[in-house]
Amino acid sequence: MKQCNGYIGILLLIGLLGSVGCTNSKEKIKQGRTWMTYQGDAASSSYSPLSQINASNVNQLQNVWTFQTTDLPDGADPVTSQSNPIIVDGILYANSAKQTVYAINAKTGEKIWSFNPLEKGEPSATSRGVTYWENGDDKRILYSARNFLMAIDATTGKLITTFGENGKVNLNVGVRDDPNKISVALTTPGSIYKDLIIVGSRLPDFYGSPPGDIRAYNIKTGELAWTFHTIPHPGEPGYETWPPDAYKYAGGANCWAGMSIDSERGMVFLALGSPTFDFYGADREGANLYGNSVLALDAATGQYKWHFQTVHHDIWDYDLPCPPNLVTLKQDGKEIDAVAQATKHGFIFVLNRDTGEPIFPVEEREVPESHLPGEIAYKTQPFPTKPKPFVKQSMTEEDLNYFTEQDYDSILKTFRSVRYEGLFTPPDLKGTLSIPATRGGVNWGGAAFDPNSSYLYIRGNNLPEIQTIVDANAHFAADNSTRYEYGRAAYKKYCATCHGTEMEGVPPTFPALSGLKGKVEEHETLLKIRQGGGQMPGFKGVLTPREERGVMAFLYDKEEPLIEVPQDIKSEEVPVRYMNSTAYRTWSDPSGNPALKAPWNTLNALNLSTGEYEWQIPLGNDEKLQEKGAPDTGLMARSGPMVTAGGLVFISGAADKKLWAFNKKTGKLVWETELPAANNANVCSYSVDGKQYIALSVGGTNENPSGSVMAFALPDLK
């Protein structure tokens, strides 16, 4: 409908757009009908102004089409996509878990085109979506695979060869380190400001990682427009918060989670991760700006505007995991434009959008000191007085689960033996209880903001971990007389944190590596080690050639001849380094049950104007662990909610394969459906020809391992 004329047109627009009426501009109406960016809009609102689907009729919602991605062979292990589809002019664009980009008719689910960015045998990696840009008839999809940013013709699905070199920009180029020895990629799609695409990076979370420079590229040419150093160079603000030479060797402080754009102010707001290494920072004494910071820059030039650091000198892997929400709240009769940043450790920082000053007071409180050799933990950390944490930040013996006496005695013994002094207890050689831990609080799915009520909707994970700190180099002091033994030591240093000391993994996030021999070709594994795959970054430039050969020998059980160690290697001084060998593992009892009492996941509604929560409910349920008559247990998940003008909050992502709709005012469940597989992506909404749809990416099954995109709508009136 091109014009808003006539009674029928008025009724249709009101039904679809809720509060958006005929007086709105054509562009705003178009934005209401579409889902043009990751997280819905440039402000990362995950909000849809459509209201055709509402609390009174959502129980009639039905699956109207399913598009099966087909980029995995039959018999392959099922995979899960984190792609948040975008919809523009009736076309849905999404990427599969194997990184193939699809253009799909958003009304019928029929394929228009597909684009595979990978050469045969190249490993795929986690990607959460694509970026769209248009200028007249020039319509482009910006997308990243491996270490390349690509421009694709949105109409044909072909590379635009005038962008970069034959359609690609090498993201390894222009960072501090040798581009042939590093691996820089994107997990979250970049953001658009005029003719620029602004990108962060995904980097290895280990010693030797590159710095997390923020960069902007010209969308038409691929030329680099500006760079901001998140690990400041001499003369740049924040340089004094690091050792003098840190800019030469320190890594991380990268924006892997995404960003938001305020076009009227010409500002970009970024959520930055922690410096490397995540759990030991003796080589980076100081606050380490701009790690763990909300960072505001001039979007056109990259010039610094302001920052707010949520964790000083992070040694807990509390990096900011989701884009900042650009919000407007009301206080004392005045509207305040703000930035709301949810965190892994359960805080929400609400900041003035122009200055970065907290809207609610934030206190710097003393926290425990580190006992690790060489580590100087920061003396204080910021605690917002409002809003209250949306997840548990403390744990006592009363919080321990009881399933059997033997299991309870085991976790009680652990609880009493490890170091625990509350939030921000530093990693310790005796073991440390961390709550929230590396996968606690909010994750990459982020929060959804309703501009009509100023409510923020957040999913929260209550997931404690036991940190096991070991000397990263101690393994090399053992008998490494064969390449296999040397590889075992290298594996424990670099790989065990995620994949486990016995290669057991933490499926599905970190797959088990035992039994690779005879199942996966060696060259495929080697390529994945170098380039990365799934959520694993590439280790090119991190592993030495000797370590790489050793890891391969260990993974493929090769007892090869003695290694001759040159004298200069034998005598080389190796810096003291520590690693967390049990990171990213929820604390469980010996039978595998959660050590912490439920709920393990919640959905929260926060009134940002008052800083008070309106409701909180457990999200997801494990019926096997649920006590009779008890509330749902909640289930760990990383995806986030979507809120609509129809009075609904949609969310999915847990292991019970459900897609839910809740009344956004009360938190009451009003509709649910079971998906064919677990989902690990955010929901989106759009309209075509006057009909509203709800869509999401869904994981693979044994019948179709590569997954699907599903769309739901109300039945047609008869």
Image: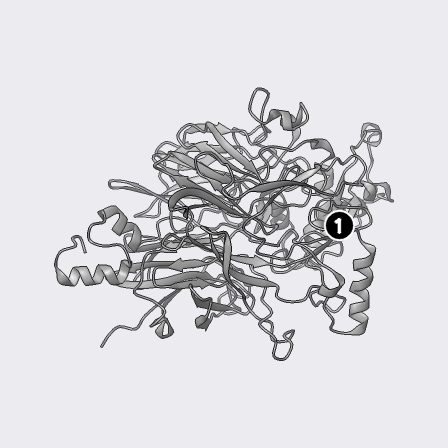
Residue 162, percent from left and from top: 35, 33
Q: What element carries label 1?
A: loop
Residue 21, percent from left and from top: 23, 54
Q: Can residue 164 be seen in this view?
A: no
Q: In which quarter of the image is the N terminus?
A: bottom left
Displayed quadrant of residue 369: top right
| Residue lying furthest top | 235
Residue 500, percent from left and from top: 72, 54
Displayed quadrant of residue 670: bottom left
Residue 48, percent from left and from top: 35, 56
Residue in the image at 27% along x and 51% along y: 30
Q: In which quarter of the image is the C terminus?
A: bottom left
| Residue lying furthest right | 479
Determine whether 236 is above or below 346 in the image. above
The residue nearer to you, when weighing 471 against 562, is 471
* Location of mark 1 (residue): 421
Q: Categorize mark 1 by other alpha carbons within 10 Å: few (<14), some (14-19), many (20+).
A: some
For badge 1, the amino acid type reads: Glu
| Residue lying furthest left | 6
Q: How many marks can you see?
A: 1
261 vs 50, left or right, is right
Residue in the image at 63% along x and 33% along y: 288
Q: Is residue 284 visible?
A: yes
